[in-house]
Image (tube, grey):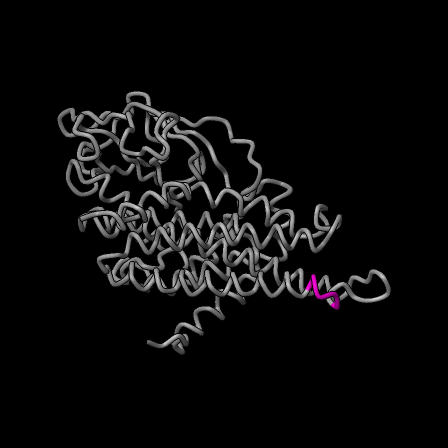
Amino acid sequence: MNFELTEDQSAIQNMAAAFTSDHISPNAEKWDAEKYWPADVARMAGALGFGGIYVGEDMGGVGLRRVESVLIFEQLSMGCPSTAAMISIHNMASWMIDAFGDEAQRSKWMPSLASLETMASYCLTEPEAGSDAAALKMSAVRDGDSYILNGNKAFISGGGTSDIYVVMARTSNDGARGISCFVVEKGTDGLSYGAQERKMGWHSQPTAALNFDDCRIPAENLIGCEGDGFKIAMKGLDGGRLNIAACSLGGAQRALNEAIQYTKERKQFGKAIADFQATQFTLADMATELEAARLMLYSAAYKVSSDTHDASTAAAMAKRFTTDIGFKVVDQALQLHGGYGYLQDYPIERLLRDLRVHQILEGTNEIMRVIIARALLKD
């Protein structure tokens, strides 16, 4: 058991950190204020391989494992968790096509997705099917050499701007086994978008509902076989949970770094507030809990890559723990900043707004507890 990063992993981590320092951190405040998706910076990330992190090299990806992925997203999110999370979702959706698509599908879509010349979104949630994802109602009916899609998807990151939508729709009424996976391209007749959602955070990425009204797509856009959709969705979410946890970890680490610097400089009662033991204890607990989350996350990433028997449980544990701890640490960092932490002049309030949703998406943390409990109690 080796807890040290390999030379290659350290190089990947350093590359992601340098990219964040040069291209994300200096612009994150502006992107948040203007609600602007930095497509040009995303393409630059794609040139480094960040658009196809665990996509096969034969399709333009870099073929890394999940540990390297969380290292990358931890660093990207130190600059902007919102932007990092959008790239994470793109990787999850792209991986589904790469892992479960046939050669024709992979050749058609993967090279441009891996380079981030085109962007992918993941479409599972519906207005009446959130945590109970298997209850989704969107239909896909076979009609000759086509499928006709009808229904709605909610809270879609990249809604209205992405080029590719990986969509879960119902092809039969057989519960989870009746769900299938499709690719729908932007501009397809019958596909429309709702207004951009007015969100607490994640301002640098677009979010909108998708509406499918007799949306006809080629039958060859079915990924895998009919009935494979729920399995594909859950496999994708194992990796997505790791990445969103990494985004919480990086955002919280940035908040801790800011708090350490601020408490050294801020003086009250004649000395730096970092000299007060209450401050020191708070910082110590923040650092300890983040390190515990980091170790859990890296371990879960190894298990998902290795497809161990407990990989899904480990991913759920890491997602639950890391996103809860991440938000807690940012909240503590804001408290240490006092009134200044509440101002947009400092990055803390933006980090707080961005990290809050991580406890909800990719499966709420309550659903993570359900997954963990089921594993504990099964025969």
Give the answer, above or below, for where 326 lies relative to 216. Answer: below
Q: Left of 108 or right of it: where is 336?
A: right
Horizontal and vertical percent position of residue 118:
39, 47
Could you tell me which residue is drawn at 56 percent across and 41 percent down? 201
Q: Residue furthest left?
A: 144
Quarter holding the N terminus? bottom left
Horizontal relation, residue 257 to residue 300: left or right:
right
Q: Main secondary structure of the magenta part?
A: helix
| Residue 199 drawn at (x, y percent) | 55, 35
Position of 27 relative to 72 (above/below):
above
Q: Is 374 or 224 nearer to us in this picture? A: 374
Q: Is residue 277 magenta?
A: yes
Residue in the foreground of this view, choosing between 30 and 228: 228
Question: Number of labelled discs?
Answer: 0
Q: Nearer the viewer, residue 120 or 237?
A: 237
Which quadrant of the view contains residue 119? top left
To which quarter of the image does residue 223 belong?
Answer: top left
Picture quadrant of residue 258: bottom right
19 in magenta: no
User: Where in the figure is residue 34, as x and y percent of width and height?
Assistant: 63, 41
The residue segment tinted magenta is 275-279
Residue at 46% in and 68% down? 13
Q: Is residue 373 above or below residue 169?
A: below
